[in-house]
Image: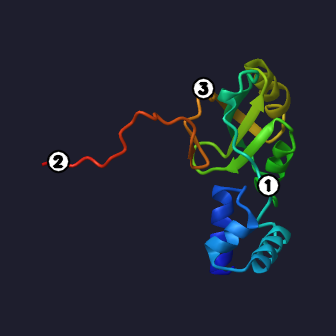
Amino acid sequence: MEEKEIELLKLLEKNGRLEVETIASMLDLDVDKTKEMMEKLEKESAILGYSTLVNWAKVLEYDGVTAMIDVKVTPTRGTGFDKVAERIYRFPEVKALYLMSGAYDLSISVEGKTMMEISRFVSDKLSTLDSVVSTTTHFVLKKYKHDGIIFEEDDDQDRRMMVSP
């Protein structure tokens, strides 16, 4: 992968709303070359989509709940963790799934309308899978930072560098 492609991906990862003309200017490329590079990266699945990070706490009508679930599984012969991971990520409640090192094998991010809805997902769908040995559910109480973006900053905070005598 070329250096300019990596720069392009970093720019889009930080702000998916940048216009092609702006990106081209930032990369010191012409617009056609930038469009061509973006289409190539989309075809190669390096760019999987363009999304918006929403602070749902600011949306008064939304009362959703997010949980992080640690899952210990028994890997299957020949496919390891992939087959059980595929089974889990196909549930519509699952927003993210990661293979982890440590005490648990998988970390799942799940969203639901209520804590009861998430607990039903765990008891009725997740824990009943043959490969699942145990689960531990952690409910997200507040998001401070996600994908490198701070949700709420104290605007009164003095950001000047402290100088001591």
User: For residue 139, what is the image quadrant?
Assistant: top right
Pinpoint residue 137: horizontal percent, then vertical percent.
66, 29
Image point (66%, 46%), residue name: 105
Residue neighbourhood size for the residue with mark 2, other residues' Cα within 10 Å, grouped as few (<14), some (14–19), many (≥20): few
Instruction: Residue type at mark 1: give it.
Output: Asp
Image point (33%, 47%), residue name: 160
Instruction: Residue type at mark 3: give it.
Output: Leu
User: For residue 39, what is the image quadrant?
Assistant: bottom right
Instruction: Report helix, strand or loop for mark 3.
Output: loop
Pinpoint residue 49: horizontal percent, then vertical percent.
80, 57
Note whether 87 is above or below 60 in the view shown: below
- Is there a contact, CB below 8 Å, between mark 2 and mark 1? no
Which residue does the numbered mark 1 point to in the structure image?
Answer: 82
Which residue does the numbered mark 2 point to in the structure image?
Answer: 164
* Coloring scheme used: rainbow
- Is there a contact, CB below 8 Å, between mark 2 and mark 3? no
Mark 2 / mark 3, whichever is N-terminal: 3
**Which of 89 and 39 lies nearest the eye of the viewer?**
39
Pinpoint residue 155: horizontal percent, then vertical percent.
46, 35
Mark 2 / mark 1, whichever is N-terminal: 1
Mark 3 / mark 1, whichever is N-terminal: 1
Q: How far is the residue under mark 3 from the one under mark 1?
A: 30 Å
Which residue does the numbered mark 3 point to in the structure image?
Answer: 141
Horizontal relation, residue 54 to residue 78: left or right:
left
**Which of 154 and 133 lies nearest the eye of the viewer?**
154
